[in-house]
Image (spheres, rainbow, N blue to C red):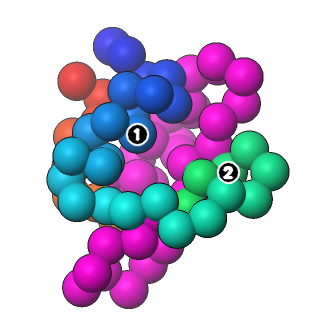
Amino acid sequence: MNTDFKSIERKVTKAGWVLVRITGSHFQFKKEGVPKTLVIPNHSGRDISIGVLKNLEKITGLSLRG
């Protein structure tokens, strides 16, 4: 299971999400037609926690854990 920032970012951008801004270590993405902003933390190569992953999956509708 690859849950680092780069692999999640690749999947999200491939699905049409666009990077709109970076605040510190948090990358914020938007997609037309989706009212929420997607925030993905980039904390020095560490894996993204399961709670954050589940929230990202809920917002995007993508399977990010596989």
Q: Which mark, by number, is residue 9?
A: 1
**In the displayed structure, does residue 2 sit left or right of residue 14?**
right
Question: Which residue is situated farthest in the top direction here?
Answer: 1
User: In the image, 60: left or right of 35?
Assistant: left
**Does residue 43 show up magenta in the picture?**
yes
Marked residue nearer the N-terminal end (2 or 1): 1
Q: Residue at x 45, y 28 (%)?
A: 6
Residue 38 visible in the picture:
no
Q: Position of residue 37 (x, y in %)?
A: 49, 72
Relative depth, front residue between 42 and 22:
22
Instruction: In the rendered view, tell whether residue 39 sits above or below residue 20.
Output: above
Q: Position of residue 52 (x, y in %)?
A: 53, 45
Residue under pointer 2: 26
The spot of residue 4 in percent (x, y) is 49, 23
Q: Is residue 44 above or below residue 62?
A: above
Query: Relative to the observer, which residue lies in front, 18 or 51?
Result: 18
Pinpoint residue 19: horizontal percent, then vertical percent: 47, 60
Closer-to-camera residue (51/62): 62
Answer left or right for 23 relative to 20. right
Q: Disc 2 residue type?
A: His
| Identity of the residue drawn at 27% across and 39% down | 11
Quarter of the figure with the C terminus: top left
Furthest residue in direction right, as rendered: 24
Callout 2 environment at 10 Å: few (<14), some (14 to 19), or many (20+)?
some
Which quadrant of the rendered structure holds the N terminus? top left
Q: Amino acid at mark 1?
A: Glu
In this rendering, does residue 60 appear at all? yes
Secondary element type, mark 2: strand
Q: Which residues are magenta?
A: 29-58
